[in-house]
Amino acid sequence: MIQNKSAVILIGKSIECLFSLRQILNSNCLVSGVVFCDQNDFISRLKNEYKRIIKYGFFLRLSQIFLSCVYILIYARDDRLFIKKCLNNFDPQELYKELDSRGISCFNTSTYHSEETLSYIKKIDPDFLVCHSPYWLDKKVRALPRDKLIIGGHPGLVPFYRGSHSAFWSIYDQCPDKNGYSIFCLDHGIDSGPLIEQEQIQYDFSISYKSNDYLLMKYISLALAKVAEQYSQGKKISSIPQAPLLQSQIRTPPGLVDFLKFQIRKISEV
């Protein structure tokens, strides 16, 4: 009898990430542990903001922040209602109760590569990792699973759209046929690992671009659970290298000018 392969799930604390954990727990994947990562404390947010300013430049980052404020005023309420409906009124509190009742070990951290987190994963010694999180996985983390496999996803069709807000940029570039999601093996790059599967999803012009991202996240959640279950049960996962991999494919959060152009181009697509 083939023994199921075990997984540790690396998960963010946002509702779409927790929804992925929900789907994995609903599957027949053997879950040996869960690592929750959260960087919403003041110090972490300050450090991350500093990194963004260095990465994007002061004026682009200012434009991105201004757009975030405008976006909240226009779309926040509709997004909240859409997320609730899209994720089937998912309640994270029930998830935490189930983890406790099933005796699944959990660990909370602010970074996956802290010594405490690495020690926790080493102790469990999983065959593979499954990741749905906005936070980076260091080389030390990627080296931990026995099979050297980390399954992850991205709300965009790779390699064409990697990085941030792929749904937004597919419409901005007037390429709605390149809106979709991808499941792949995580490596050292940005959404660049060998591709397991992907699917083109029609962009929904009746909702915001972030709600389109949430819709793609739901598809990712379901696909991650399916692939994790298959691998856990001993089925081989086929993957192919992404090509070509270009720096121009890595997209950044949009600024205000980008948003205005997006609105104009969206009208032409409807």
Image (cartoon, helix red, strand yellow):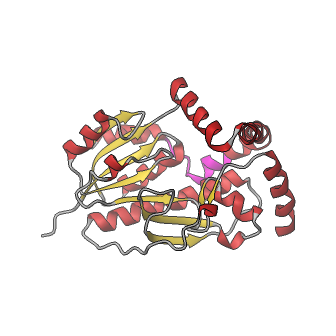
**Where does the C terminus fall, quadrant-wise?**
bottom right
Q: Is residue 214 above or below residue 248?
A: above
Using the rendered image of the protein, determine whether residue 270 is visible from the camera's viewpoint: no
Q: How many marks?
A: 0
Using the rendered image of the protein, determine whether residue 43 is visible from the camera's viewpoint: yes
Identify the residue at horizontal 56%, vertical 51% (top origin): 87
Left or right: residue 147 versus residue 53 is left
Please identify the residue farthest to the left as the structure is shown.
1
Q: Position of residue 6 (x, y in %)?
A: 24, 56
Q: Position of residue 148 (x, y in %)?
A: 28, 59
**Where does the N terminus fall, quadrant-wise?**
bottom left
Q: Position of residue 199 (x, y in %)?
A: 55, 72
**Which span is picked out in magenta?**
80-91
Q: Is residue 163 above or below residue 198?
A: above
Most foreground residue, 173 or 225: 173
Most foreground residue, 129 or 81: 129
Picture quarter containing residue 106? top left
Identify the residue at horizontal 38%, vertical 34% (top origin): 109
Most foreground residue, 47 or 172: 47
Q: Is residue 109 above or below residue 244?
A: above
Q: Is residue 201 magenta?
A: no
Identify the residue at horizontal 74%, vertical 42% (top origin): 60
Q: Position of residue 116 (x, y in %)?
A: 29, 33
Picture quarter containing residue 227? bottom left
Please identify the residue farthest to the top as the structure is shown.
42
Left or right: residue 214 versus residue 35 is right
Left or right: residue 121 versus residue 219 is left
Q: Is residue 89 magenta?
A: yes
